[in-house]
Amino acid sequence: MSKYVIDASVAIKWVVQETGTEQALTLRRRRLMAPDLIAPEWANILWKKVRLAELDAERALLSARVLERAEIELHPMRSFLAEATQLAVALDHPAYDCTYLALALRMGVQFVTADARFLKRVRERADPRQAAAVLSLFDVST
């Protein structure tokens, strides 16, 4: 079974119904990994959805508990911080997103994201090996 690195834009769709939820739920059956950065990113997304009245506080808390138990192999991001920084500089893109790509490159697996802005940046600026490592959630074959 294939392994993938996923980011918060994919995992959040497991608990919040939005475009791509069906694909994200299907991907959940795969072996998944992420930098440990994903946990505070989940919390931040849930907080924003409460602020925007897209979720109530109780639903956000329940969603956080579901995500806490998600079967994702977490990797400490400090072990690939240099690679993430190098990618951020090369792509001129926030290091938060580049951390996921750095992990995928290190582990020799593909990185799946629903972040259209990051996908566009990778396609415009990344070298071919880096670009080949990134997949849109909507392009993953299940």
Image: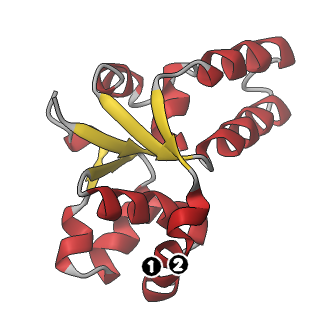
* Residue holding disc 2: 82
* Residue holding disc 1: 87
Q: Position of residue 122 (x, y in %)?
A: 34, 71
Residue for point 16% across, 27% down: 142
Residue for point 16% across, 29% down: 1
Q: Which mark is residue 110?
A: none
Q: Position of residue 136 (x, y in %)?
A: 29, 48
Q: Is residue 71 above or below residue 125?
A: above
Q: In this view, does 84 lie above or below 20?
A: below
Q: Which is more toward the observer, 36 or 51?
A: 36
Q: Where is residue 78 in the image (x, y as percent from the top left)?
A: 61, 64
Q: Is residue 141 above or below residue 63?
A: below
Mark 2 lies on a secondary structure that is helix
Tag nearer the camera, 1 or 2: 2
Q: Position of residue 50 (x, y in %)?
A: 81, 29
| Residue count near mark 1 (Cα–Cα under 10 Å), binned few <14, some 14–19, many ≥20 | many
Residue for point 64% across, 23% down: 68
Mark 1 lies on a secondary structure that is helix
Q: In which quarter of the image is residue 125?
A: bottom left
How far apart marks 1 and 2 lie (CA) works out to: 9 Å
Q: Is residue 38 left or right of residue 60?
A: left
